[in-house]
Amino acid sequence: MLKWAQRIVAEQQALHQALTTMRGGLSGVLRIGAIPTALTVASLLTAPMYHATPNGFFRRAIDTNSTLVVEPRFDAQRYLELIDRHRITHAYAVATMFVRLLRLPEAVRQRCDVSSLKVVVHGAAPTAPEVKRRMIDWFGPVLLEHYGSTELGAVVYCNSADWLSHPGTVGKALPYVDLKVFDAQRNELPNGTPGEIFARFRLYPDFVYQNDPAKRAAMEYKGLWTAGDIGYLDDDGFLYLSDRKNDMVISGGVNIYPKEIETELYELPGVFDCAVFGIPDEEFGEALAAIIQRVKGASLDETQVREFLRGRIAKYKLPKVIEFRDALPREDSGKLFKRKLRDEFWKAAGRQI
């Protein structure tokens, strides 16, 4: 009986330690409450709380008695006006929000005071380096980035100083996190070589996929889990994302990461949103398509897009198809439904991927 009671106490202590560490990790990533208590903490959330990080942001704001401004959807101009009006100190964002903020007229951007900001947490999708640099120039060194997933939790993190010294990184492993990069044969890769990212927060709880044990088993290797992203580590331990594994295009036997082309397209005046992905090609197996949403009133055409890209990327990475749409399908969180666009081309060819 005594041994049983001792075991229960030990398990409860371990659980308490795990929860304390997880809560500390969440606080480290979100940084709500990380400013002097003499200052009013006001948080702004314009993302759906059924996603992991917005939910964590919301709960952390409540835990610290922060003033919380919640919006049903993101609107770039209103986002700035709310920061100005409520003297927001902490905000959540994703890459798409940054792009749309930067697309606002200069007069609108100058009219709103963002100097109250102390922390802007962002993640969910990679941010183009030039976009992030411009946001730091505008908002100040207040951007805090993290990478992870619902299954993994937040596993890497970087502040603005880290990012400026390692441009393009999404961060360095947090405490209690094991992080490795493997090739397709599950060999660990040296620094600088892209491969599939595997990680594990050692105190994070295990999980299952409902009615899909095969999917759960496929994402684990040697006790580490993958969210299906491709990236690499540098010699300082900072992680860089190349693309989603499912988004990588193999054209003529060469691996192409669409994110690289999308990053360049966002630098082209007149591009409001874009998606690059693989489409069927008889000769090379796959080719690239670029779907672009123009800035309202812009007269951008296919020739201008090709000429812009030709001087920035290798010839074999140039999209074979360039189309313009009024809008691109995105989740409420800002993530792109790229499959919806890609499936149009594969179904038309009578093929699947």
Image (tube, rainbow, N blue to C red):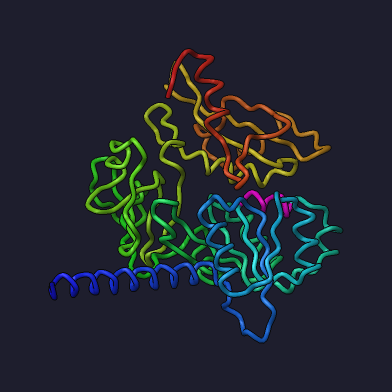
Horizontal arrangement in the rendering, residue 107 relative to residue 92 (left or right)? right
Q: Quadrant of residue 235?
A: bottom left
With respect to residue 67, does 233 lie above or below? Answer: above
Give the position of the N terminus as an image quadrant: bottom left
The x, y position of residue 74, in whole percent, is 71, 50
Q: Please provide the residue range marked out in magenta.
A: 95-102
| 140 or 267: nearer the viewer | 140
Find residue 283 and report its image quarter.
top left
**Lateral position of residue 147 relative to residue 276, left or right:** left
Is 99 inside the magenta-drawn segment? Answer: yes
- Camera-side residue of 151 and 253: 151
Q: Residue at x 70, y 29 (%)?
A: 325
Residue at (45% x, 16% y) in the render: 351
**Is residue 174 in the magenta section?**
no
**Does the magenta stretch mainly form a helix, a strand or a loop?**
helix
At which x and y percent is residue 51?
53, 51
Q: Nearer the viewer, residue 188 or 254?
A: 188
